[in-house]
Amino acid sequence: MDQIIARFRVDWPGFTLDVDLTMPGTGVTAIFGRSGSGKTTLLRAIAGLERSPHGFLSFNGEVWQDDCRFLPVHKRPLGYVFQEASLFPHLSVRKNLLFGLKRCTAEGAVSLGQVIELLGIDHLLERKTDCLSGGERQRVAIARALAVSPRILLMDEPLSALDSERKQEILPYLERLRDELHIPILYVSHSAAEVSRLADHLVVLDGGRVSAQGPLVETLAGTGFPLCAGKDRAVVLDGVVAERDEAWCLMRVEFAGGSLWSRDRGIPPGRRVRLLVPSGGVSISLERHSDSSILNSLPGLVETVLDGEHPGLSLVLVRIGASKLLARVTKRSLAALSLEPGQSVWVQVKSASVME
Amino acid sequence: MILAHEELQALWLTVKLAASATLILVVTGTPIAWWLARTRSRLKGAVGAVVALPLVLPPTVLGFYLLLAMGTNGPVGMLTRALGIGALPFTFPGLVVASVFYSLPFMVQPLQNAFEAIGDRHLEVAATLGASPLDAFFSVAVPLALPGFLTASVLTFAHTVGKFGVVLMIGGNIPGISRVASVQIYDHVEALEYAQAHRLSALMIIFSFLVLLGIYRQRPTSNKG
């Protein structure tokens, strides 16, 4: 029931968007692709800003568009964050926030105070919008979209107009939204780094069509999708800091299926973190090694074997509890260990870094 | 400077005429400008051209057709007679109607530019924040186009003050009814009353200059928003 079903066909000269998607109605779904792949058009069609004749859209069981209905944008319970902040220049920050609130009929799931606190804009409320920095403007724009208590938040590359410093300023706020508000977020981006840091689910668009979709880790690992740490394929793991070992400057991060030691980054225990694990830092053995310099050794099952980026290399997807890791091994090692799907193995993880 | 009674009457009539025409045009010109700024219809070009016609036509041409339309056998004339208003030519309301047509582009074009400069984005934002199209028009488009409204109103007012040809065609030269300042000056010159003509003409120049000064001084600030 909690799902978004979207079928659209938009025909423009030289471009066609043709999608038939079912997306989860919870968590962060990233719509990822190169520029011109139709990401923004898809998001605009979902919002109702773009009319696609004969389209179909239902949100958690409610039909927003079909052959005889088209719920106008202003009646859809959504929040939309545009690429540029697009604050109303004739209104103060506070009045920008109140614009939607005054018109919102739904019982608020989030209070304005909570939104202001979440985005840290308390001190900006009385300012004029042209007295804000780029990062501040975008935070106000996000707060304004949330102030209407939307049941879904649509974000169209909210960071792309900002420099990398401003991006770093806003990303933690986006993580807080994901963790603290229980509304689904559709997040359009062409940045693999943002997607792998924020998303739970991934839709990859290419030339107006869906080329891959699914849970983030599988989709990243399974489709040869180029999430890279350097030149290396990587996966991400969602975890919680379980303990810190200050004597050795390490911290242990628990994830669904096990835990990993990583360098201590001063993050207090209990905080959610996302780890990036490059496949080059993961090795496989048939037995557990206790005499290795590598701290992390985890039992798992081989799920699939994929071709690597070089003819001599393979990528082995190993299931560890509910999580998956990707190990880069040579074809020769693959043959020597005769690795195949279903086999029990030990994986050694040399490096896992907190994404921030 | 002391003005004669008939000159004061002419000035007052001028102001009344210009104010009435401007008010009517704010109400009627705004929807036309909004439609022209937002539409993707193929009619846009044709409607835009019709609105701009008074800019290029000699006032006598417009006045001639308005006179025919408002005359006893014209369509407007028959309508006003049926409604019990009587004939419009050579009356003050007739003059207002003619001024509205003649000054239409001075209201519509600056407004259309102002609406076009707002762009789609702010209106889309308003829609995603729950504002219906009408709500977004009043709460976003009008405040953002406010400098445009000001420019358009002042230009319309000033242009109506300065017109002459259409007034003569439709209103004639009746003191207190249709003898506005520009016609009064013409009368003075005809009667070789150059001193009086000078006074009124100087007033018109000062007035026009002040109006244009006001518009040009607000330009740079209006672009920033």
Image (cartoon, coloured by chain):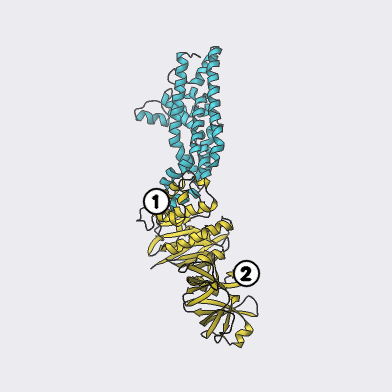
Chain colours: A yellow, B cyan
Residue nearer the viewer, A52 or A333: A333
Q: Indicate the position of residue A344 as horizontal and vertical percent values.
A: 51, 85
Residue nearer the viewer, A122 or A91: A122
Chain containing mark 1: A
Q: CA distance from mark 1 to mark 2?
A: 44 Å
Asked whether residue A59 is in view, the answer is yes
- Which residue does the image show at 34% across and 28% down from the upper left? B84
- Which residue does the image show at 45% across and 40% down from the upper left? B31
Q: Which residue is mark 1?
A: A101
Asked whether residue B43 is in view, the answer is no
Q: Amino acid at mark 1?
A: Leu
Q: Quadrant of the N terminus of chain A?
A: bottom left
Query: Mark 1 packing: few (<14 Cα in 10 Å), some, or many (20+)?
Result: many
Q: Horizontally, is B157 left or right of A351 in the view?
A: left
Q: Indicate the position of residue B19 as horizontal and vertical percent values.
A: 45, 28
Query: Mark 2 packing: few (<14 Cα in 10 Å), some, or many (20+)?
Result: few
- Which residue does the image show at 43% across and 22% down from the upper left? B90
Q: Which residue is mark 2?
A: A230
Q: Which numbered tag is attached to residue B116?
A: none
Residue nearer the viewer, B129 or A19: B129
